[in-house]
Image (cartoon, grey):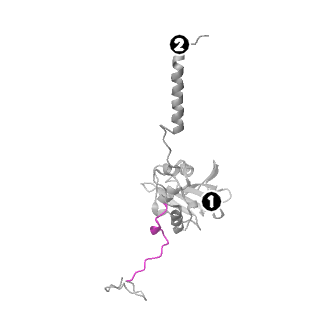
Amino acid sequence: MTSHPRRARLRPVLTALALTLTLAAATGCGTEVAPDAEAARSGSADPAPDRAELEARALAVQTVTEHVWVTDVPGYALAAQSVGVVGDDGFGSVYTTPDGGQLHLRVERRAHAGADCTKDPAPAGGQEPLLTCERDGEQWYRAAESDHAYAWEQDGLVVTVSGAPEEVDRATLRAAARAAHRADGHELDQVLPPADDAPGQPPVERGDLPPVGDGAPDNDVGASG
């Protein structure tokens, strides 16, 4: 059978095109290298701070980096002054809205907290009877008159996202719980206070206070030197 003349002319062209595409794929030509996963999620192209520095900053607020969690909810922003320890070495923070709404994020060791509201009717230490206690996916949802929350257990920790019903509805609370995750390096840098600003630092010694008694500060020249 005789080959069609047009097909015969096209075959070398197609072969050359295929070879060009293969070489481009092999050399990465025309492709974009994805940025570091942590940097992409945090929106920063800069490398995360040294891990030892982050550990020290976590220790300054009496927790550890593995217990620092964050979430992302449209309309809510982290209140930096709310960041602190919960229990022995847990972590807590508050996310707020411009009109004063609050959403609380808590991370505690399982020994001090429970996620299953059928076993712990008031896991947050409240005295109100629960109006709702039910499983919602991998998490537990509980509601009382003045508070409702999603809680779940992970890696020996109990993570709880809660708020007042009049400030945050269940759908928003669920979204916050689904978005909650252990902070990566960039997020730790954003959440943890700088070492100099961390609570628990020794008080500044004032030279203008008298050594004994409760008298007024000594304002003589050189007293504060």
Number of marks? 2
Give how far across and how far down residue 6 sits, in percent: 52, 14
Predominant secondary structure in magenta?
A: loop
Q: Is residue 193 magenta?
A: yes
Question: Callout 1: helix, strand or loop?
Answer: strand
Which of the labelled discs sits on residue 5, or is there none?
Answer: 2
Residue 67 position in % (x across, y down): 57, 61
The disc placed on residue 157 is 1
Q: In this view, which residue lies farthest toward the left?
A: 221
Residue visible at 45% across and 68% down?
Answer: 197
For residue 139: magenta?
A: no
Residue kind at label 2, given as amino acid type? Pro
Residue 81, percent across and down? 46, 63
Q: Nearer the viewer, residue 213 or 26?
A: 26
> Is residue 116 left or right of 86 when viewed as pictured?
right
Outermost residue, top direction? 1
Label of residue 183 in the image? none
Is label 2 in a helix, a strand or a loop? helix
For label 2, the crowd category at 10 Å Cα-Cα, with few meaning under 14, some 14 to 19 and many 20 or more, is few
Nearest-to-viewer mark from 2 and 1: 2
Which quadrant would the N terminus be assigned to in this image?
top right
Residue extent of the magenta highlight: 191-207
* Foreground residue among 162 and 207: 207
Structural distance between the alpha carbons of marks 2 and 1? 73 Å
For the residue pair 186 and 204, the one nearer the viewer reads as 186
- Residue 131 lies in quadrant: bottom right
Q: Determine crowd level at label 1: few under 14, some 14-19, many 20+ residues with C-alpha closer than 10 A.
A: many
